[in-house]
Amino acid sequence: MDLTPTADEQSLRDECRAWLREHLPWEYGVGLPPRFDDLVDEVAFGRAWQAKLAEGRWVGVAWPEQYGGRGGGPVEHYIVTEELATARAPELVGRIGVNLLGPTVLAHGTDEQRARFLPNIVSAREIWCQLFSEPEAGSDLASLRTRATRVDGGWVLNGQKVWTSYAQFADWGACLARTDFDARPQAGITYFVVDMRADGVDVRPLRQITDEREFNEVFLTDVFVPDDRVVGPVNEGWRIANSTLTHERGVNPRQLVIHAQLVDELWRLAASRDVLDDPRIGPRLAQAYVEIQLFRLHNWRSVSRHAKGGELGPVGSINKLWWSEMSKRLHDTVMAVLGETAPLWRGAAENPGDGTWQRSWLYYQASSIWAGTNEIQRNVIGERTLGLPR
């Protein structure tokens, strides 16, 4: 594999980096995004930042220009995402729409749906959430119970969703609901676009272990959804949802860069605490570095496959499984380096720093659960990649 960038690829990288140096609200390579105590303020800041990115056409890079993109491909998307992460630009506040639901509408929606939704996803004028998981249907989505009943002009939805990121700020939600209870589980599901401000939508934030409230429960009570907000054919939502999940589990340059930065910071932390040569710590630091390089190769392989017209398919599960478990091992090593100060949280005078590492450790404990549990990923890899029996 020749990993040398083409002239056009290098030009795109240089252009993106130059734009970021000019437009970041802090000094490139030195400053960091502001930290907000209130999620409302953070989302407002994120909307403004994503709108600025959209003006420069740095959002939805692989989307057609008519919808606000650049008409690029997987490699161009990877380059821009990598540059944004390297600059430590804030994560897109509308990332669920941009990374997951927008590509699904692009692939399976009507022309009218694309024209209505995609430009507003790019600019963050409208934020989306993903109404997939339920209390009794997490990774096993085929067992979902939310019902959609046929009425004049559309459907009425009733059910409960959970672990819905940013639902309290979302304008639209991509919702899976059962439309045929006599069909086999995967065959009777339809993909709906729900107005999150509609009558009957009740959003209840959930307090997380980090003391934040990004996740939510969403209750749907007689929520009307018109026919023109059904994505794809009725009863084929399972196939369409798998398109969304492939994007969620596939190439992840942002997580790659973030974790590469975390490894660099971990090594500096270990040096400051004089444990680089500790036989209990040193091998774990080396392992963290090697695993980041392996993750980089996983990403490049997936990008190359996608750029040549291949589908990521179950290979995306390998990427998700790898980086999530790598992240948990990395953060366990961080706690070992912090030693007796590891349990300390914000405000503790003895804490080296401001609790950022502790918050990061708590946050990434969930990485083996979100986007499909790692147990499910192993099943997908075993059955669909290795051809093992169920």
Image (tube, helix red, strand yellow):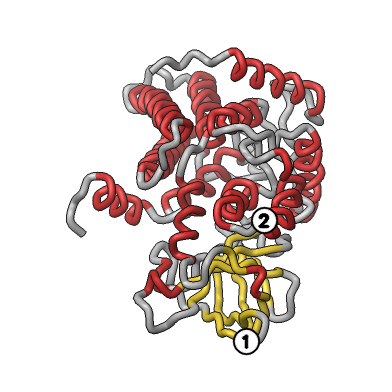
The quarter holding residue 296 reads top left
User: What label sits on residue 111 in the rendered view?
Assistant: 2
Q: Residue furthest front?
A: 111
Which residue is at a point 54% across and 48% down the rendered structure image? 363
**SS assignment at label 2:** helix
- Residue at 49%, 60% in the rendered image: 241
Q: Is residue 219 above or below residue 79?
A: below
Q: Is residue 203 above or below residue 180?
A: above
Numbered mark located on residue 30 in the image? none
Asked whether residue 162 appears in the rendered view, the answer is no
Residue type of the residue flagged with mark 2: Asp
Q: Looking at the figure, which quarter contains the C terminus?
A: bottom left
Q: Are there few (<14), some (14-19), or many (20+) residues within 10 Å of tag 2?
A: few
Residue 151 is marked as 1
Amino acid type indicated by mark 1: Val
Task: Report whether 81 appears left or right of 237.
Answer: right
Q: Position of residue 330 (x, y in %)?
A: 43, 35
Q: Nearer the viewer, residue 66 or 58?
A: 66
Q: Nearer the viewer, residue 242 or 233?
A: 233
Residue 205 at x, y percent in the picture: 65, 67
Is 117 left, or right, of 7 in this rendering?
Answer: right
- Is tag 2's residue or tag 1's residue first in the polypeptide sequence? 2
**Quadrant in the picture for residue 91:** top right
Residue 211, given in percent of the width and then of the height, sits at 62, 56
